[in-house]
Amino acid sequence: MDQKIRVLVAKPGLDGHDRGAKIVARALRDAGMEVVYTGLHQTAEMIVETAIQEDVNVIGLSLLSGAHMTLFIDVTKLLKEKGLDDVLVIGGGIIPEEDVSKLKKAGVSGVFGPGTHCDDIVEFIRKNVKK
Amino acid sequence: MNEFAAKVLEGDPRSIAKLITQAENTSPLAASQMKKIHPYTGKAYVIGITGVMGSGKSTLIYEMTKEYRRQGLKVGIIAIDPTSPFSGGALLGDRIRMTELATDNGVFIRSMGTRGMLGGLASAVYDVVEILDASGKDIILVETVGVGQAEVDIIKIADTTLVVLIPGLGDSIQTIKAGIMEIADIYIVNKADRSGVEQAVAELESLIDITCIDKDRKTPVLTTIAKQKKGIIELVKEIENHKNYLKKTKMFELKRRKRYEAELVEIIRKRLMNFIFDESTFKGKVESLIDKISKKEVDPYSAAEEILGKILK
Amino acid sequence: MFDKNKMINIKKKKDEWSKECYLKHIKNHPERKKKFNNLSSIDIKSVYDPDDISHLDFYDHIGFPGDYPFLRGIHPTMYRGRLWTMRQFSGFGSAEETNKRYKYLLKHGETGLSVAFDYPTLYGYDTDHTLSRGEFGKCGVAISSLNDMEILFNGIPIDEVTTSMTINGPAAIVWAFYIANAENRGISIKRIGGTIQNDILKEYIAQKSFIFPPEPSMRLIVDTFEYGYKEVPRWNTISISGYHIREAGSTAIQELAFTLGDGVEYVKWAIKRGLKIDDFAPRLSFFFNAHNDFFEEIAKYRAARRIWAQEMKKLGAKKDRSLYMRFHTQTAGCSLTAQQPEINIARVTMQALSAVLGGTQSLHTNSMDEALALPSAKAARIALRTQQIIAEESGVTNTVDPLGGSYYIEWLTDKMVEETYKYFDKVEKLGGVIPAIEKGFFQREIAESAYRYQKEIDSKDRIMVGVNKYQMDEPIEIPILKMDEKGEERQINRLKKLRKNRNNSKFERNLSNLRSAAKGDKNLMPIILECVHSYATLGETCDVLREVFGEYKEPAIY
């Protein structure tokens, strides 16, 4: 069996900074994963529907505008509503320490800020992906 | 088990998606479910879309889908991108141009990596077509990227194959000359607001005149500006014309036969390759044979005959 | 540039030195690395000498400040005459909170204002639009109407202080808010000064805050050029920006080449419209990034001045002012670390110094906490003080272009000019700037560079202090800015009231005038101003334009 980790890299909201999302997408590809990139300006509904159709194991959310407490949690809430409990959610951006623990509680299992080594993200996914 | 196939037949997106994953992973579960859904397939019309990078295929698919949706049809989209031969990973970004379709429950989009398939198409693409077909999609659009084998292979699944070109790219016409001239059922010159459209169309038509000289159907050339939604309705009509032509000339059945043949070959190939390279008994043998070939102790032909001999026994 | 006979001797001497001194030395004391290169991956030699710049002509390629090709500075006296404008980019939460911050910064010696808008504003949505969810005031101030603009500048002498506004897609409308506010305050719009960023090309390329497709966007921009030089003559109607291209991950050379290429594109569109180059060109301005590689950055600014002067001449400019590459600089946000944030002060100091040695006209220094959150007041003050130290303590302002004549700097400057022209050729072959954008050329180039940079950091080929070397494991003690939680609600209520209380028949008439004008080819600025005066909101005005112009969708580049 040829099993591959499938990841959705998504940019919720209006933020257009896609440098990080694109770098992470490439790094995950280079680590042998199949990465679906949504492009900019995704709503929570779009992200969750895409995750369903693409049957991804992981959703990576990237946001630098500071709206993560609203927009990341919109996604995790909707995932729960739809019963997608087998999807690992991680997030990245300019995220203050005090928000990190709140996000984790809300279902964003890994939070990665500036200065993160790409391998750390790869490793985190490999370790935590639910198969 | 039974429920899985049943849910696909109901059109449940999660079950469709999960079964596609199983098929991509060539799991035994997939095989058992594929057997169950086959009787319910054959209704969907499959359109292949190929062309050079940057020719606007994704936008075209987006607009075509919106047109089919307007007609009340359900659409499945399969977007294939190459898998990196080095990492085995893939970046699948064709959805970027279609994001608004994500929340339309009459549309199902799946991105696939080629996963080392020799021909350039994703090996599971036949399964995915069957799954989407069984799930009630009326139209299935299969998009392949790049120039090469994938473009030629698309005709094995597609009922109608569209080849998309853009004006001003001299080499795109060259590409056609180089080998994919025969595959197009309809040519599209997209981005027709750019200069050089007439020239591109004229060049194509003169090529068609040569290649279609003894055929009763001349491959049509359409111009579109997908970004401005121009030429889409005409394109959809032209596909319908081609479908009618296929039905009238009995070529439709022939095409379908060809697809099943390709699918059968693919299943056998996959199983055989798995058997040879993945099963513990053979893998060691294969490895040692490769060592021997490297050391010139044996030649590749004799090695292959040795392996095949063991299987056929 | 040098005497031929002397050069022969120098070359001879150099060969001797290389053999007898350098190569012998590194045999026993090897250099730390096999290769030294800068952030644009240009190989840097151990030492530079006259031979490296002997191909240059002093008058054509270097010259004197205030004289063509202006490489050494646009003014003959530079900072001996007037210091650069200290302009801190700032904005968050509601108009009230940002207004308070502006007054604080002005009190502490800031000499110009610079407005950061939140995402809904950048995309031309009102605060109460569904897509604005979660974004209110998050990375800038929310401005949805003239009302908000009035509050933002309440009590600030906008006839004395100049204001730069980072706004692109809806720049014409936000500028109209500013103009209308001045008019309502009885200030002549001939006297107000400032800048709108108004650079849509780099939005398509890098920053991605676009609204309309290229054609109508370019039309709006040329409208502002024309309106500007006729009616608001002290306003810079564009700030052609490399900053965001760099932040998106480009190299210095790509930043330079893509930005100047964009600049030339705007000029061509304006000329095509029938504007005279010497009318509008003096109001074009630029905006560059100041990243880590000190000398490369300085060379970049110098090269930019030379290229721009050359290109503008080619396009027919006669006035000196049209040849000036005037620019604002901001230190590189992407170079800041969330780890050990205090050390960002040192980074910012170096970066700011490079901008000053490169001859910037105005400068923003980043706050140390920006990789964590919006800057706190204290962090913003320290950033401003950094500029004041450079200006008033360091002595670098005593002479113009103090690095001019350095073999290394002159060689590197010329190298960057050369590389820029290579990019110009590539873009030309792709059919020009807009076709290259549609083909994803710039986007792909930037993504490649960004990924390479990240890989270099990951593999420690490039050091980021505190990130991949000298790491520490300690809690970060930086006070984080807290915003007024009532701000959003207050602003939404304000919007509701505004929509109810305005003269709605006048407002609707103006919007329908805008709709028909947008379909034609008249300059839209006067009618936009009328809409704004009748309290049309940003979202309402943009919606009319969206309806006529359509919306831009980016090509899939990843």
Image: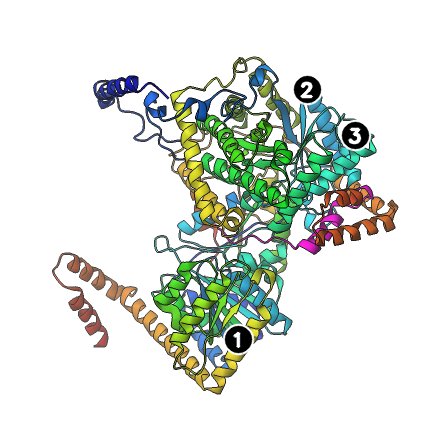
Quadrant (top left, top right, bottom left, bottom right) of the C terminus of chain B = bottom left
Q: Residues within 10 Å of mark 2 (few under 14, many from 20)?
A: few
- Quadrant of the image occupied by residue C10: top left
Look at mark 1 in the image and give the residue it sits on: B239
Look at mark 3 in the image and give the residue it sits on: C188
| Residue C511 coordinates in the image, percent (x, y) | 79, 50
Kindly identify which chain the residue marked by label 2 belongs to: C
Q: Is residue B206 above or below residue C260?
A: below
Question: Contact (CB < 8 A) between labels 2 and 1?
Answer: no
Q: Residue at x 46, y 41 (%)?
A: C424
Q: SS class of the residue under badge 2?
A: loop
Q: Residue at x 47, y 79 (%)?
A: B38
Q: Which mark is residue C108?
A: 2
**Residues at marks 2 and 1, common chain?**
no
Q: Is residue C7 left or right of residue C487?
A: left
In this rendered view, identify the residue nearer to me: A15 or C517.
Answer: C517
Q: Residues within 10 Å of mark 1 (few under 14, many from 20)?
A: some
Disc 2/disc 1 C-alpha distance (Å): 70 Å
Q: Amino acid at mark 2?
A: His
Q: Amino acid at mark 1?
A: Ile
Magenta-highlighted residues: C533-558
| Residue A49 coordinates in the image, percent (x, y) | 58, 60
In the rendered structure, does residue C335 fall within the stretch colored magenta? no
In this rendered view, identify the residue nearer to me: A102 or C345.
Answer: C345
Q: How is the image coloured?
A: rainbow
Kindly identify which chain the residue marked by label 1 belongs to: B
